[in-house]
Image (cartoon, rainbow, N blue to C red):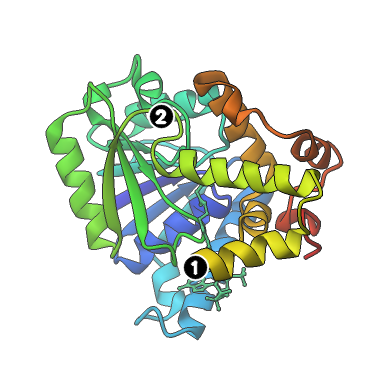
């Protein structure tokens, strides 16, 4: 299969890695020469890590031969498009509209973690649109949340499920709702952990250890917020607060840290120093 991934950040590069490792040809679209180079490097680094861990049976170099990174999406006979651009509804809608023209036979998937798939599909060939929500780090996390909206064709859902399962992931199907199932629960715990910290109930380290050792989470909710990005979490929380009410209102501490540029692992400082 030829697949297109739009956006070469953490998620897009991870999705490209996954598709290449699954034997597919991948066109990865970014904008600007620097980002094109950075996206290719990110996929190469990720494949190299997988090879070090014995998780792929072909060399990273041979897999990378099936990757084309482009500056602008032109016509491609792709069967699947996955957009993984920043969490901005207007941007995602524009990207999907462009992909609908460039790839007229493709299923159009959004990797959004909270935005309405119904609204993203409006004005597009909605029967081909659905949500495929991957988790960070994409090559490692075994889940994909498949999001249905009222206008999606059953065959789109069935085909997308088959492809995703072919990549070794487990699929859960959810109906379109703010934050779907996983972001709603994950963000709720993450925000509560930040409130506990702000109220001085326990240290960041102890809050995280509590959820790791008490609940079996692989990492605590604050370190996970650092990994995902405080800016990303803030954007999702603001969206969920607008859709679902005050229980998702972001704590001041989260806003303050984002304003200071403490975005988590990617800037070296979040709730922890990296
Ligand atoms: N291919 C590529 N990279 C791999 C890999 C593979 N097959 N296996 C591991 N790696 C990477 C890891 O990502 C990690 O990368 P960094 O060096 O950049 O940190 C590194 O190799 C070390 O991996 P290990 O498995 O040795 O490390 P670990 O045991 O500490 O596990 C972890 C790291 C997988 C991230 C684990 O802590 C974990 O599962 N954490 C929870 C992650 C989680 O909850 N993710 C969901 C986030 S929410 C989300 O994504 C949704 C959203 O919408 C925002």
From where the camera sits, is residue 195 visible?
A: yes
Mark in front: 1 vs 2 = 1
Q: Residue 122, located in which quarter of the rendered image? A: top left
- The crowding category of the residue bearing disc 1, from other C-alpha atoms within 10 Å (few below 14, some 14 to 19, many at least 20), is few
The quadrant of the rendered image in which ligand 1 is seen is: bottom right
Q: Is residue 7 left or right of residue 238?
A: left
Q: Are marks 1 and 2 in contact (CB under 8 Å)?
A: no
Which label belongs to residue 216? 1
- The crowding category of the residue bearing disc 2, from other C-alpha atoms within 10 Å (few below 14, some 14 to 19, many at least 20), is many
User: Which residue shows up at 77% across the image and 53% down it?
Assistant: 270
Q: Is residue 48 left or right of residue 111?
A: right
Which label belongs to residue 96? 2
When the figure is inspected, residue 68 is found, relative to residue 260, above or below; the finding is: below
Q: Give the percent coordinates (x, y) of residue 210.
A: 62, 64
User: Which residue shows up at 23% across the image and 22% down it?
Assistant: 150
Tell me the SS state at disc 2. helix
Q: CA distance from mark 1 to mark 2?
A: 38 Å
When the figure is inspected, residue 240 is found, relative to residue 122, above or below; the finding is: below
Tell me the SS state at disc 1. loop
Q: Give the percent coordinates (x, y) of residue 151.
A: 22, 21
User: Which residue shows up at 60% across the image and 33% down it?
Assistant: 237
């Amino acid at each position: 299969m030829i697949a297109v991934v739009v956006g070469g950040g953490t998620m897009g590069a991870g999705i490209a890695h996954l598709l290449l490792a699954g034997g597919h040809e991948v066109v990865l679209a970014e904008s600007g020469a620097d980002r094109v180079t950075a996206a290719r490097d990110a996929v190469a680094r990720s494949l190299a890590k997988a090879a070090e861990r014995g998780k792929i049976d072909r060399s990273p170099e041979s897999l990378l031969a099936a990757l084309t990174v482009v500056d602008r999406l032109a016509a491609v006979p792709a069967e699947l498009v996955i957009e993984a651009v920043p969490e901005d509804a207007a941007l995602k809608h524009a990207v999907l509209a462009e992909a609908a023209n460039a790839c007229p036979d493709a299923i159009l998937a959004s990797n959004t973690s909270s935005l309405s798939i119904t609204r993203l599909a409006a004005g597009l060939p909605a029967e081909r649109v659905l949500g495929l929500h991957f988790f960070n780090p994409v090559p490692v996390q075994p889940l994909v949340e498949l999001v249905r909206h009222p206008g999606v064709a059953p065959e789109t859902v069935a085909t997308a499920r088959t492809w995703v399962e072919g990549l070794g992931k487990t699929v859960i199907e959810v109906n379109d709702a703010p934050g779907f199932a996983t972001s709603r629960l994950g963000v709720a715990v993450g925000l509560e952990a930040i409130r506990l910290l702000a109220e001085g109930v326990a240290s960041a380290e102890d809050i995280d250890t509590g959820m790791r050792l008490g609940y079996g989470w692989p990492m605590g909710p604050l370190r996970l917020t650092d990994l995902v990005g405080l800016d990303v979490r803030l954007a999702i929380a603001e969206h969920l607060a607008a859709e679902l009410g005050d229980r998702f209102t972001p704590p001041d501490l989260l806003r303050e840290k984002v304003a200071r540029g403490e975005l988590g692992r990617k800037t070296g400082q979040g709730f922890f120093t990296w």
